[in-house]
Image (spheres, rainbow, N blue to C red):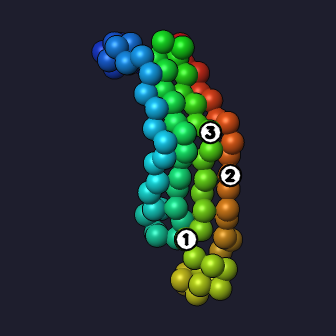
Amino acid sequence: MLDRSRLLILQRVVNVNVAKIAWPSPNGLYDYIAENISLNSIAGTLSVNQILISPRLGENAFVNAIPTQDDRFNFSFNNVVVFWC
């Protein structure tokens, strides 16, 4: 169900820009980073120049930090845009 009260709040915001937001994963193995974020409620867009999921530890330290074998990921998503009506 669409919550119209939340949309009314967004309609008042014309443009919000944030250079960078970063936070660690709950297990402390990764950093989540979003850079150059732009919210434009008039155009109905949320744009993120880059989203990174980066390991906080080197390969050997990562392997030693977890009790079982697991993969170590390093993701980069560029020019992500979300549109809403």
- Tell me the element at label 1: loop
* Residue at 55% from the left image edge and 45% from the top image edge: 35
Q: Quadrant of the N terminus?
A: top left
- Disc assigned to residue 49: 3
Residue 45 or residue 2, whichever sits in front: 45
* Residue at 55% from the left image edge and 22% from the top image edge: 45
Would residue 42 be found to the left or right of residue 6 on screen? right
Which quadrant would residue 59 be assigned to in this image?
A: bottom right
Total label count? 3
Badge 2: residue crowd in 10 Å (few <14, some 14–19, many ≥20): few
Distance in Å between CA atoms under marks 3 and 1: 21 Å
- Tell me the element at label 3: strand
Q: Amino acid at mark 2?
A: Ser
- Tell me the element at label 2: strand
For residue 66, above or below residue 23: below
The x and y percentages for residue 85 are 53, 13
Reading the image, the residue beneath label 1 is 56
Reading the image, the residue beneath label 2 is 76
Do the CB atoms of the residues marked 2 and 3 lie less than 8 Å apart?
no
Distance in Å between CA atoms under marks 1 and 2: 15 Å
Q: Earlier in the sequence, mark 2 or mark 3?
A: 3
Say whether residue 15 is visible: yes
The x and y percentages for residue 78 are 69, 42
Residue 32 or residue 65, whichever sits in front: 32
Distance in Å between CA atoms under marks 2 and 3: 10 Å
- Disc assigned to residue 74: none
Do the CB atoms of the residues marked 3 and 1 lie less than 8 Å apart?
no
Would residue 27 be found to the left or right of residue 63 on screen? left
Q: Amino acid at mark 1?
A: Arg
Q: Earlier in the sequence, mark 3 or mark 1?
A: 3
Badge 3: residue crowd in 10 Å (few <14, some 14–19, many ≥20): some
